[in-house]
Amino acid sequence: MKVHPIKTALLGVAVTSLTLAGCSKNDGPGTTPPDNEGRWITVSGALMDEEAGDGNGGTMVYSVTTAQAKDPNVSINVFDQGMHIKSQRTARLQASADGNFLYNIQYVGDDGGIFNKYSVHGKKDFRPDGPEVETATYVSTSPRWLKAAEGIGVAVRATANDAVYQGTNPNFVFQHITAKTDAITLDLNDPKITQTASFELALSAEEQAAGYYVSRIDVPVINKAGNKVFIGAAISKVDPARFTLEDGKPVFATDRTSPKAWAKTLVLDYPSLTNPQLITSTQTRANTNGYRSTMQYVGTDGHVYQATSGEAVGDGGSKILRISSATNDYDNSYVFSLDQALGLTNTYIETWKYAGNGIGFVVYSLVNAAGERTGGYIARVDLNAKTATKYDLPNEANLNFRQIQNLTIEGDEVYVAVAPVGQDGNIYIFDSKTGEMTVGAKLVNKTGNQYIGVY
């Protein structure tokens, strides 16, 4: 395992004077720009590329005050009036807790892997803050990353290696597949890379022999003690008995009929990014890496609560698991089943937000018999009582939250962008204590585009 401390890769400088931008270089989370009396709420939207809802045409952002975000008489048109965030495809945005800063690592293209920080000043006024940081050298031009704790970013990648085998055609004997894995940490306040690590990631010998391997990692979060980082994982499988030949070498067939692997999480020591270990839940066979959106949070009680997705049809739907603060391993005595809490089957958690004291807000779809995700729904969940209450949203059957990236929280209120692809919608505000739902600002849409986040 290779670990490289305090490596810094910087590109250029901020193109806008920080003095003119209204905040000094030392400003960080907790500093409110003087041009807003309260917190900025930033809305993001994904542009279509070739197909409606594909989200691959880039990302637009637009910010309003909290009062405006909560006002149903206010209209937000991010696609005509917002700023285009640097990224060839959908930007993977994160934000400071106070809403004053946005962070982005550009996704694919010539500038893929470039980190940018912006200060937020209302409407389309987002100003570069600090230097750009080049991360592609360590985690590729399409890294998976999150704000893993306030002021700290963690970016990762896992790339499956070629299968290792013995023998000659037609008597090839499959051995295993491992994953080349890389991780870095980023200082979000004073943008720079602070740590890098590289290692090979392998499952147990039994799982490897059966064809299972780590195919993707994502959604890192740092625990309450600040000494571990948990990284969600997707596990794929090949059939060791079936292969085709390419250039005389066997390419083992993807196996989609065998049981999925038990849910797993990669654990690294923090801040060193050393001592990689995989922990395993026996509560569900599913993925823990999510898709572009946070899936795990440090709870008020110090435990990490982690949503799963991708369970096979009839396998009990999405769960929320718990990683113990005492052991840094799964607490296999705990599981929250969204299916059971709602009395449904085949729920699929697209994303969620932990709101404190065991309360969360889950955005989910339903998986039909053909394995297709359908509709878009929101529920308030109580992780302690293991109950859930579904909200009634307009046009639920036509909602599609597959591209959703972020829900935001301000005080006791959780903000969610709700709009069908290519159709108008609204910001919805949910009170975490009372459960009350209110309708906020109108979201003006355009054909093929969709609203994907609130920050």
Image (cartoon, rainbow, N blue to C red):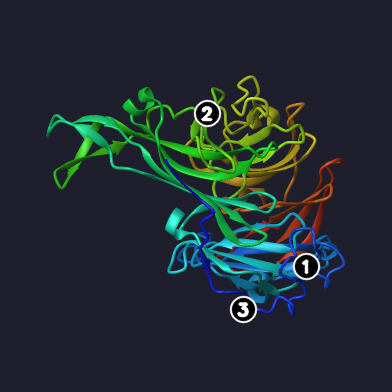
Give the Cα separation between the discs numbered 3 and 1.
Answer: 23 Å
Mark 2 or mark 1, which has the lower sequence index? 1
Q: Do the residues labelled 2 and 3 touch (CB within 8 Å)?
A: no
Reading the image, the residue beneath label 3 is 15
The answer to whether residue 452 is above or below residue 239 is: below
Q: In the displayed structure, does residue 106 sit left or right of residue 130?
A: left
Residue 372 place in picture, x, y as percent: 50, 42
Q: In this view, does 175 lie to the left or right of 295?
A: left
Give whichever of discs 2 and 3 has the lower sequence position.
Answer: 3
Instruction: Give the CA separation, mark 2 to mark 1.
Output: 42 Å
Pointer 2 residue? 279
- 424 or 294: nearer the viewer: 294
Q: Quadrant of residue 288?
A: top right
| Secondary element at image label 2 | strand
| Whole-percent x, y for residue 124 in the image | 69, 74
User: What amino acid is at disc 1?
Assistant: Val
Q: Is residue 141 visible?
A: no
Find the residue positioned furthest to the top: 333
| Amino acid on which disc 2 is placed | Ile
Callout 3: few (<14), some (14-19), or many (20+) C-alpha neighbours within 10 Å? few
Quarter in which the N terminus is drawn: top left
Tag nearer the camera, 3 or 1 = 3
Q: Mark 1 points at which residue?
A: 64
